[in-house]
Each structure stands twice: as structure tokens, then as C-alpha cells.
Amino acid sequence: MTTLQIAFLVLVFVVVVAGVLGATAVMRPNAAQDRLREFTAGDARPARSDRWVKWFANVSRPIGKLSAPEEGFEKSSLKLRFAHAGIRNPAAPTVFFGVKTLLTLGLPMLAFAGMSLAGSTLRGNNLLMIILLMACFGYYGPNAWLSGKVTRRQREIFESFPDALDLMTVCVEAGLGTESALMRVAEDMQFKSPVLSEEMRLVNLELRAGADREKALRNFAIRTGVDEVDGFVTMISQAERFGTSIAASLRIHADMLRTRRRQKAEEAAAKIALKLLFPLMFCIFPSLMVVLMGPAMIQVYRLLLPTFAGGR
């Protein structure tokens, strides 16, 4: 192995390790919560992980500009997707775009180094195609990870929200106000759905800070991106505006969400037959035919071919 190949492998190793560490930094929870926990514990020093995230953000900021949106992160649709994914670390966008650039450049280099060491005979257009595929995977892979995180988080909120509304209905009927009911539901839901509990706690913090109730609830709907939460915010606003019973409105809305959740479950169950069709046709049925027809075909081959050969 020549010196140039060794230097190339070292460069690939550094790029891949930096990408992995950056992805780990992005997936960490909110740094503000860790900071608040440290102050509560009486330690005002920043955590070592937070210092590492800030350091990686500062290092990856120049290369992150290569994959950052032209209009800027604050004006792009990715800002809303980060909110839907529950990523509120201020250094997360910089780390995200830095990791995206590192993977886009590092994965093709890693593929080329691996094929060179393995003695691959791919040259020309075939080699270029593999490198381009790895570059596309590195560029769109973080977007796919972010979309998956958003989908899982919204699904958890959607499945837990009817139960939260039932608890809120009980609290309101017991005489608690809307703010107190939200606080109590946030405490009770922290074990069943930590994501929904955290969002409700943020609503309570905004209300304590002096924000208007309608604005705080509207921010709740924007952060989650779930249509059912948006309908809940609209229902609360209309109930307060027209003077209707909030408890009755909550009960009706909870029944509607529970019906919608059941319908989605039935829809998913109805799609199972269609989703199993292609695996059955291309994976299970050929194997089954080989197992059932294989011995018979072997016997036919052994008996009929000598007969045909003797007849000639």
C-alpha cells in the first residue's frame, strides 16, 4: 500500500468519524432542559456534551454552508420540520448541515477506498454511478432521518392525544381552569407520552411568562404539526369566544379523535392484504413451488429422459 493510499484512508476515516459524531450530537435532547437540570442541581457549569455540541457546531459551520438553504435556515421549511421533530438545540441546524456535507463528501470517498482495497474492476461509468449513488445517499440520508423522526413523533402525539383530552375533560369538570388542567394533564401524561407531556409543559411555561392563551395554544399546534391538535386549539378558541361549555366541547372532540384513531387502525389493517401480495408472489410462492414440485420434477427427469433416449 502506497503512502498516497494511506493518506487517503486516513482522510476518509476522519470524515466518516466526524459525520457520525455530528449525527450523534444532533440526536441529543434539548440542551436547554439539560441546562435547567444543572441549575436545579446547583451546578452552573455547562455539561461536557453541550460543550462538545457547540465545538462541533463551530467547526462544521464553514462546511455546513455548502448544503444550507439559500434563503437561510430561519426562512426555510426545515425550521418548521425541526420544530415538528422536537429538536430545539440552537446548534442543531449548523450540526445538521455540517453532517450533511461531510456525508456527501465522505461516503463517496469511503466507497472508492473500499473498492480500491478490494481490487474491484469497476471503471468508467460504473464507478461513477456508484460514487454518485453514495453521494446522493449522504445528501438525502439526513433528510430521510429527519422525516422519520417527525413521523414517529407526530404519530405518538396523535395516538396519545385522545387520552390526554379525556384527562383534561375530567379536570375541567372537577372545577379546574384550562391552565391548571393543562398542567395536571402534563404531569399525568409524562410516563405514557413524554413528547406530549413536554409540549403541554411548554404551553404552561408560555402562559406563566404572560403570553396570551390563544397564542400559546397556537404555538402548541405549530410545534407539533398534528391536525388533531390544530383542531383542538380551534375548538378551545371558539368555545371561549362563544361562551359554550369547554368540558362538553372537550368530550365531543375526544370522541371524534378516538373514532378517527380507530378508523386509521382499520385502514392500516385493510392494507395488510395488499402489502402481503408482493412478498407472497415473489418470495414465498416460488420457494413453496420449489419445495413441492422439486422432488416430482427430479423423478420425472430421472425416469422420462432415459426412456426418451432409449426410444431414439
Image: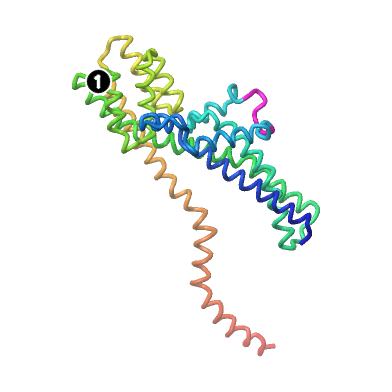
Magenta span: helix, strand or loop, mainly?
loop
Q: Relative to residue 257, is residue 247 drawn left or right?
A: left
Answer with the quarter of the image where residue 245 lies. Answer: top left
Q: Toward the viewer: 187 or 138?
A: 187
> Residue shown at 31%/14% (left/top)?
239
**Image quarter in which the N terminus is found:** bottom right
Residue occupying the point 76% across, 53% down: 126
Q: Please provide the residue range marked out in magenta.
A: 66-72
Q: Is residue 158 magenta?
A: no
Name the residue: 25% across, 24% down.
169
Image quarter of residue 200 = top left
In the foreground, 28 or 184: 28
Q: Nearer the viewer, residue 28 or 193?
A: 28
Q: Is residue 122 above or below residue 136?
A: below
Figure check: 283 above or below 312: above
Under mark 1, the amino acid is Ala
| Residue 35 x %, y % | 43, 30
Q: Which residue is mark 1?
A: 247
Q: Secondary structure at mark 1?
A: helix
Residue 36 in the image: x percent, y percent?
A: 40, 29
